[in-house]
Image (cartoon, coloured by chain):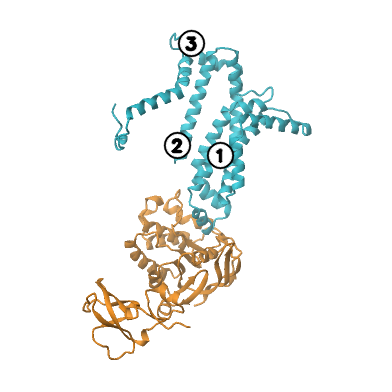
Chain colours: A orange, B cyan
């Protein structure tokens, strides 16, 4: 599979801030690629630069090998699903979906009607076509926004935190639908999120950004298991820290007896033990004062607060950070 | 007194009855003179004694050549000025929305607070200076120019207020979906602004139709507007025709204001 999008040392500087600083990355055809990071890390700026809604200070954006950084937004074959969906309130669902086809460079494609029928069916919008956006639920609005962009067959679909406007119960369901949709249409997704769980769940690869710079790039597994920095380790999930060594809570073990086969054993006192359904959450304090969290299988026996235990882990489960 | 259902939801205000009385008196103070004007406009007598209902003053008003000509002038001026002011004001509001500038906004506010008489005098001075270099005279066109000048700021204010409630990502979405800047404005921003632009146009129309002070400074000898004609008639002595035509003007302006408010709330 070839590259569809390439960013080369892309920067966007404001007088007071470097929103994005020399970001370079490649996105492959058909990939679900996430830009992950805390607010202000430059992920939305990157999306807006690719869409053409902002101009880069320096650097290049190549779409299928062609430089597009100086083109106007309407002259780039990418499309954005906005955070609040930005559906046109004065148009019906059908008119919203047809908006891009009407204005597209080179006129309405010959298979426009077929595209619409397919997408409407795929996104289950058949009985909503004559509604106004304000009559739709959050999930339906999101599907209209997706249809409106996908009908243009963009080279890359840009998604700006499309799940954040939904209520939490719906989010997981829509997340599954989004993943299935991407597999089905085979279009490259560039997905912006600050939610590490979402990024891990959805992405083929993740670019973790921090303060306008690329922190780490890799598959979810690579970043989770082999973070390149303390920031990367902590952003992707909880970490227990001891003298610069990180251990994930699910790799942290507890036992009353001295475990035989590990050198990493520390005397500790249990502070709290809570049953959370899918796991047992235990907080313990090591003799050196470090606060550790262990996530044990839910069928483990419980611990009492104040109980003396051994906290231990396997050497191969330690997160190896380059020093 | 029975309170309306939605008033009942509010806690009782101490001294509520006094407050109601005060409100009624305040409203009378505001509108009693207008009410009297309307009553005497349908009075059969020429004097301020009630003699019975009659529409004779309305008939006389409609047959008064001078009044009808000045009404026509007022309408021409108001329509022309509204057209220009609405286009210029809307574009100006759009520009201010895209790129907020405190100085330009302050400059506009200045034209809102300049006393009318000062604006009138300055316009007269300006036109006289221009006349030295170009061959044209005072007339309806100078009135139109003056009216555009002072009503633009009202259009800007109304349209900008609506723009500020608009989601900027709508226009971005249009561009993103392949529309050019003009198409995005034409197909998305403009339709969403239409009610506010309509409200602004009506407001500009009313302000232009009503104006006396500035108009009287910049009008030519043969370009009398309705307010000028009414002023002249009222000064000549009691004339119930003035009451009749004034009532019609109040009716027209009142209707326009109601429509304008409706549009603005949409």
Residues marked 1 and 2, same chain:
yes
Q: Which residue is located at x 46 percent, y 17 percent?
A: B36
Label 2, secondary structure: give it: helix
Label at residue B262? 2
> In the rendered view, does B84 fall on the left or right side of A295?
right
The answer to whether A288 appears left or right of B110 in the picture is: left
Q: Residue furthest bottom?
A: A261
In the picture provided, is B100 more to the left or to the right than A319?
A: right
Can you see residue B40?
A: yes
Report the residue marked by disc 3. B48
Please report, as a chain letter, where disc 3 is located: B
Sequence-wise, the earlier of marks 3 and 2 is: 3
Q: Chain of mark 1?
A: B
Task: Determine the residue located farthest toward the right in the rendered image.
Answer: B133
Question: Which residue in the protein does label 1 denote?
Answer: B155
The chain identifier of the residue carrying mark 2 reads B
Give the image location of residue B57, x and y in percent: 51, 14
Q: Is label 3 in contact with label 2 (beta carbons under 8 Å)? A: no
């Amino acid at each position: 599979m070839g590259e569809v999008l390439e960013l080369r040392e892309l920067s966007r500087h404001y007088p007071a801030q470097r929103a994005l600083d020399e970001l370079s990355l490649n996105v492959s055809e058909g990939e679900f690629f996430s830009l992950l990071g805390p607010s202000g890390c430059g992920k939305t700026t990157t999306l807006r630069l690719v869409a053409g809604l902002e101009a880069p200070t320096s650097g290049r954006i190549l779409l299928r090998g062609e430089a597009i950084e100086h083109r106007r937004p309407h002259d780039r074959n990418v499309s954005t699903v906005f955070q609040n969906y930005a559906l046109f309130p004065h148009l019906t669902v059908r008119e919203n979906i047809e908006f891009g086809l009407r204005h597209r460079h080179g006129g309405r494609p010959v298979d426009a009607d077929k595209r619409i029928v397919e997408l409407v069916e795929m996104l289950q919008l058949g009985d909503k076509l004559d509604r106004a956006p304000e009559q739709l639920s959050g999930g339906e609005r999101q599907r209209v926004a997706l249809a409106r962009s996908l009908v243009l067959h963009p080279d890359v679909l840009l998604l700006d935190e499309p799940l954040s406007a939904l209520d939490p119960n719906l989010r997981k369901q829509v997340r599954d639908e989004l993943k299935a949709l991407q597999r089905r249409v085979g279009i490259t997704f560039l997905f912006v999120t600050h939610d590490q769980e979402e990024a891990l769940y959805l992405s083929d690869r993740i670019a973790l950004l921090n303060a306008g710079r690329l922190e780490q790039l890799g598959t979810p597994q690579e970043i989770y298991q082999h973070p390149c920095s303390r920031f990367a380790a902590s952003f992707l999930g909880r970490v227990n820290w001891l003298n610069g060594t990180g251990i994930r809570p699910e790799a942290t073990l507890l036992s009353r007896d001295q475990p035989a086969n590990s050198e990493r054993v520390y005397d500790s006192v249990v502070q709290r033990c809570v049953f959370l359904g899918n796991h047992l959450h235990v907080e313990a304090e090591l003799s050196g004062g470090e606060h550790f969290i262990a996530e044990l299988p839910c069928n483990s026996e419980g611990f009492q607060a104040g109980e003396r235990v051994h906290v231990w882990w396997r050497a191969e489960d330690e997160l190896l950070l380059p020093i | 007194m029975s309170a309306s259902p939605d008033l009942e939801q509010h806690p009782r205000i101490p001294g509520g009855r006094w407050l109601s009385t005060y409100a009624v008196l305040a409203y009378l103070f505001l509108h009693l003179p207008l009410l009297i004007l309307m009553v005497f406009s349908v009075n059969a007598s020429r004097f301020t004694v009630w003699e019975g209902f009659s529409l004779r003053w309305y008939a006389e008003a409609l047959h008064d050549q001078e009044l009808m000509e000045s009404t026509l002038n007022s309408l021409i001026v108001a329509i022309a000025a509204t057209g220009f002011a609405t286009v210029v004001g809307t574009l100006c509001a759009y520009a201010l929305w895209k790129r907020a500038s405190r100085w330009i906004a302050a400059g506009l506010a200045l034209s809102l607070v300049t006393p009318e008489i000062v604006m009138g005098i300055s316009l007269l001075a300006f036109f006289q200076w221009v006349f030295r270099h170009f061959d044209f005279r005072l007339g309806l066109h100078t009135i139109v120019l003056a009216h555009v000048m002072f009503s633009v700021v009202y259009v800007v204010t109304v349209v900008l207020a609506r723009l500020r409630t608009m989601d900027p990502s709508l226009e971005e979405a249009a561009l993103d979906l392949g529309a050019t800047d003009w198409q995005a404005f034409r197909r998305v921003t403009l339709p969403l602004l239409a009610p506010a632009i309509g409200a602004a146009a009506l407001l500009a129309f009313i302000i232009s139709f009503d104006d006396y002070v500035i108009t009287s400074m910049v009008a030519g000898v043969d370009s009398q507007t309705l307010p000028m004609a009414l002023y002249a008639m009222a000064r000549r002595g009691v004339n119930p025709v003035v009451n009749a035509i004034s009532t019609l003007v109040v009716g027209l302006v009142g209707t326009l204001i109601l429509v304008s408010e409706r549009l603005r709330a949409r």
